[in-house]
Amino acid sequence: MMATAALAALPTMAQPAKGDSLVFTTVIENPVTSIKNQNNSGTCWSYSSLAFLESEAIKKNPKLKDDLDLCESFLVNKTYVDRADRSVRTHGDASFSQGGSFYDAIYCMKNYGLIPEGIMPYPITAYGDSLFNFNSFFPPMEAYIKTVATSNAKKINPAWKKSVQGMINDYLGECPTEFEYKGKKYTPQSFVSDYLKLDPNDYVSLTSYTHEPFYSSFILEIQDNWRWASSYNLPLDEFMRVMEEAVKAGWTFAWGADVSEDGFNRRGSKNACVATVPDVKVSAGVGSDQSRWTGEKAGAKITESDNAGEKEITQEMRQEGYDTWTTTDDHGMQIYGIAKDQNGKEYFMMKNSWGDYGPYKGFWYVSKPYVAYKTMNIVINKNAVPKDIRKKLGI
């Protein structure tokens, strides 16, 4: 997708919008690419995972930083065809929806490759622009796949998959098998190995829940984990240690979290685009991927206190949230840095995919308690995991 901001990272001192009270100073920030806009689509998983992989490629070759932009349409095309197949094979028990997981990008990279933006055409939307708008594209396809998957027929015509591929191609364009980029010819697979120089085997998913043994792996039970990918399970203190030490050592990671919480402050809040776990009540609204999670609703009121502390997060609180559905698999983002406010409190720096949004132009600050409480899972380079924890996990 086209970039909506030329920023690659926040400045050293991030000044809040007029009337806000927090001022952030960067402790460390690792290279990220420009802000993108998923617009009216449930494809945050694609934007965040590719943002993460862009940073991974830049870490290997800093010269790529100026213009690296991976193609969401290619990843979404390949993923939706596979997800439709899984739904039909399970007679509809595996859901088909716009969402996905970080593992979809790793799987695509390993089995199909990746391509740069500009090789496939931009989506043809109802509004004639270059941003995803699935309002018309997705519902008919979803209905068709449900009809096939839940059919009472004793045998189905395999041509259904060609029909689905045609619907996807009509909107996103056909995926190339070969292309030219910067004067050289690549396949999607050789682009990964020869240009990006990424190894799909370098990436692991980590989480922290008590219903499965620590230091083992299990399939995280969320609907969009339709490929049934496994995550390594860590105690909360070690889970947080991985994230903090990785960022301080120069790594970024893909971050999946619940963003429907009161503390995920939306536009209009005194401290907009800051996520915390406050002890005070914050009202939330409803609305489009961005509006859905930011609560932008006419007349919405937000109550907050500059001096409000945050809850102390425990392993038990994390588990209760997951077990009772109050922690939900909402949104994929990228964590790339650490900053502190004027009181010395530290926050993770987060890159979002809602375009040039809020006082920090698409970037957010997320408190460590919020990350401890509401992280569903992360995908990270295994080499970013501290050696003693890698040993415990056997990776």
Image (tube, rainbow, N blue to C red):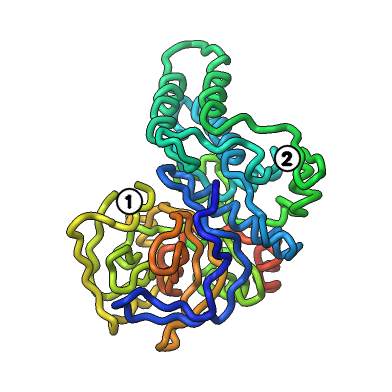
Secondary element at tag 2: helix
- Between 393 and 192, the one nearer to me in the picture: 192
Residue farthest to the bottom?
A: 343
Residue 375 location, x and y as percent? 46, 62
Alpha-carbon distance for marks 2 and 1?
Answer: 34 Å
Residue 144 location, x and y as percent? 43, 22
Question: Mark 2: few, some, or many residues within 10 Å (few <14, many ≥20)?
Answer: many
- Between 192 and 39, the one nearer to me in the picture: 39
- Specify which label sits upstream in the sequence, 2 or 1: 2
Residue farthest to the left?
A: 299
Which residue is label 1 attached to?
292
Residue found 57% across the figure and 15% down from its top: 158
Residue 34 drawn above or below residue 314: above
Relative placement, left or right, of 178 versus 317 is right
Image quarter (top left, top right, bottom left or bottom right) of the C terminus:
bottom right
> Quadrant of the rendered structure where residue 279 is?
bottom left
Question: Mark 1: few, some, or many residues within 10 Å (few <14, many ≥20)?
Answer: some
- Count of labels in the image: 2
> Quadrant of the rendered structure where residue 277 is?
bottom left
Relative placement, left or right, of 315 versus 11 is left
> Quadrant of the rendered structure where residue 265 is?
bottom left
Residue found 55% across the figure and 46% down from its top: 1
Residue 348 drawn above or below residue 34: below
Relative placement, left or right, of 369 versus 110 is left
Disc marking residue 120: none
Residue found 49% across the figure and 11% down from its top: 154
Residue 116 visible in the current orientation: yes
Residue 383 location, x and y as percent? 71, 65
Residue 216 visible in the current orientation: no
Which residue is label 2 attached to?
188
Give the amino acid type for the residue marked by disc 1 in the picture: Arg
Give the amino acid type for the residue marked by disc 2 in the picture: Pro
